Amino acid sequence: MALFEHPPRHLFFTGKGGVGKTSVACATAISLADEGLRVLLVSTDPASNLDEVLETPLNSAPTPILAVANLAAMNIDPEAAALAYREKVVGPYRGVLPLAAIRSMEEQLSGACTTEIAAFDEFSRILGDPATTTQFDHVLFDTAPTGHTLRLLELPAAWTGFLEANVGGTSCLGPLAGLQAQQALYDASRKTLIDGEKTVLVLVSRPERTALREAERTREELAHLGLTRVEVVLNALFTATDRDDPIAVALEERGHAALAAIPEGLRHQPIQKLPLLPFGLVGIAALRALLTPPPEVTLPSLDTLLPALAAQGHGVILTMGKGGVGKTSVAIEVARQLVQLGHAVHLTTTDPAAHVVDTMGEPVAGIRVSRIDPVVETQAYAAEVLKTAGAGLDPAGRALLEEDLRSPCTEEIAVFRAFARIVDQGQEGFVVIDTAPTGHTLLLLDAAESYHREVLRTAGQAPPEVQRLLPRLRDPLFTRILLVTLPEATPVHEAAQLQRDLARADIHPFAWVINQSLLPLKVTDPVLVQRRSQETRYHQEVAALSQRVVVLPWKA
């Protein structure tokens, strides 16, 4: 969100120390830059931590923030500014005046007052001389804690009056003749500060009585200086989600009590409220989160896929993914929804640890459940080979064939042929296949590729369903692959690798299913709240990998 509908060119962020001025200033600068506006963010705080928050080393010159297009930032270093200011004042007199006079001038310019005015000199240059920042649309100031800020803001008026009343002599700042050269600049900065069309003062506070009282005192003093355009940001408002947590409830009530007693002067100013976030505001992503409410996450459910899955009236639907992500549950749910649309479904699995029946529970009318049983298929395949290829063998040759059929390769071929037969049934109706964990599935698909090459080489000696298998797996209108994952690093990354492996065989998933997600749910347990927030990154990773993504909420 934007803190201001029509922000002026200059925005000052001030308030009691520790209320979040830097965070709010940085977040606002990033928000404006993200809109395509050119933004300069300036810190006048002697204890600035702008470098840390923006994760960029800064100095006294505008430095581009590489992670944010259109944004630059700088620190006004009071000590460096004072050194440069002293040299600017004293330098012209070196070699002209006696050494004792030079030392006297340096002594006059060594106090805290000089440091203050030197920093202000830089501040006035940025504020009062448009040519200095002509390349920027907005200039934002992350100011020091309130007392220091007020002294800076008083200086334009105070020093303009002082210079008008004194026509000669010296001050702690050195010869007044040197200051008179700055008079026009100081006057321009003062006029800019009090012009509500050009400048807004943003009072940042927390929902705490002392911070709000401090903000009201600042508002009154600013009003005396002629700065009338003031807006308030109430930062770190807390709302308890777990009403059984006494600390959370007490923290919320304390904030409400402070807001109920907000000083009258603040009550009539425009007020923006920002939530207390569950993470530190360091880094660009975190800062964006402060002013950008969590996007409305589109969490389409599985039923949004059904019209496309059912459009052909027949075909094969495969659930694939790492073991333990819930492929079986997804396969069962797809089968159930197809039945609800009036289709008959053959639900089967190639998983050696098949548990479709256990997961499904009671039988569902319209769903025929089967399993490709490796033992049964291997026995049938071995019997077929012995009956055909082994029919004319002598006892020694038959014994050698039987030995060969006891190899693991035989089971893989037997299961693969059964898989091809099941897929072939998709031309008559719907077949939903709960596949084995990823590695086993890839063995089947590798076998399909090998079989296909062999079919081309031998001019069609393989069974017809095997000849048709790979073309059907590649046909997006016949075979729909659902990649199932969990909103966690390993399942997402393994599914991404599976997608790349499938692509090499010219097979492309139809959609991704993020299973057992907390994101659609309201949770209050601190651990679950943290896990829920961490899920977002994996949802974003999946969204970048597929145009179709559905989300299934966590279920017991």
Image: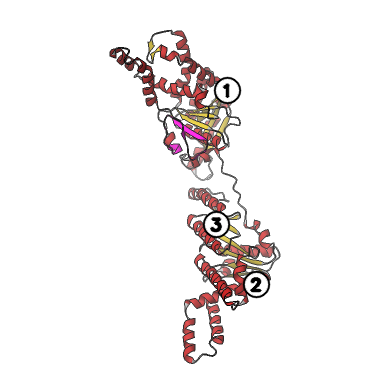
Picture quadrant where residue 553 is located: bottom right
Residue 65 part of the magenta segment: yes
- Please state the total of marks drawn on the protein image: 3
Which residue corresponds to mark 3?
516
- State whether residue 277 is above or below residue 232: below
The CA span between labels 1 and 2 is 75 Å
- Mark linked to residue 146: none
Which residue corresponds to mark 2?
425
Tag 3: residue type? Gln
Mark 1 surroundings: few (<14), some (14-19) or many (≥20) residues within 10 A: some
Q: Which of labels 1 and 3 is toward the front?
A: 1
> Is most of the magenta stretch helix, strand or loop?
loop
Where residue 250 appears, x then y in whole percent? 50, 39
Which residue corresponds to mark 1?
196
Closer to the chain start, of discs 1 and 2, is 1
Q: Secondary structure at mark 2?
A: helix
The CA span between labels 3 and 2 is 31 Å
Frontmost residue, 526 versus 313: 313
Q: Secondary structure at mark 1?
A: loop
Closer to the chain start, of discs 3 and 2, is 2
Q: Going by the image, does 395 lie left or right of 173?
A: right
Give me the residue at 45% from left, 39% from top: 282
Give me the residue at 68% from left, 65% from top: 339
Tag 1: residue type? Gly
